[in-house]
Amino acid sequence: MPLQNDTPGRPSGLAYLVGRLDHVLSRRLRDSLAPLGLTVTQYTALSVFRAQGSLSNAQLAERTMVSPQSANEMVKTMEAQGWIERRPDPSHGRIIQISLTIAGHAVMERCDAEVVKVEAQMFAGLALEEKMALHSALRGAVRALSGS
């Protein structure tokens, strides 16, 4: 059962609000990251590399929610910027592992500062416990819908 609508004439279901937040947040992140020369998808990819280490193009595509073709184009662009490097997988000759470079870590530090500002504004009205509960609830929702 959807939650009660507190603003008559406006959609208020959780799915709608999450979608709306995704749209607004993407726009704010795009505006914050563009002066640093990154797209939101590139920032997401670099974040995944930082968290996961080396990944294949297929793994990157899955984790950044883009097609393998789009991931491949993004990898070419980021490699040309010097943010990532590609190396053959030592255990499988046809797989190329991609990882962050020192320059990639440096650009991530600059971008992280901008993302922290956006998150601080977005959650300014929440106490730490509420932020932690929201984080847990969102992770749970992702797991429930993705089966992982």
Image (spheres, rainbow, N blue to C red):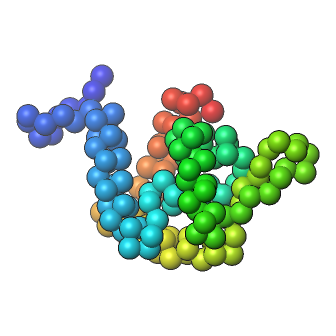
Q: In this view, does 56 lie to the left or right of 44?
A: right
Q: In which quarter of the image is residue 123?
A: bottom left
Report the residue that reaches farthest toward the left.
9
Number of disc labels: 0
Closer to us: 43 or 68: 68
- Quadrant of the snapshot with the N terminus: top left
Q: Is residue 122 visible?
A: no
- Residue pictured at 69% horizontal, 75% vertical: 102
Q: Which residue lies furthest to the top in this view?
A: 1
> In this view of the protein, can residue 143 be seen by the observer?
yes
Q: Please provide percent x and percent y for residue 64.
A: 55, 46
Q: In which quarter of the image is residue 86?
A: bottom right
Q: Quadrant of residue 127?
A: bottom left
Residue located at (60% from left, 66% from top): 80
Q: Which residue is drawn at 67% across and 40% down?
A: 58
Residue 116, placed above or below residue 14: below
Nearest the viewer among 69 and 60 is 69
Quarter of the figure with the C terminus: top right
Image check: 76 left or right of 17? right
Q: Residue at x 67, y 45 (%)?
A: 57
| Residue 94 image point, x, y percent | 83, 42
Residue 44 at x, y percent in the picture: 53, 55
Q: Position of residue 124 (x, y in %)?
A: 32, 66
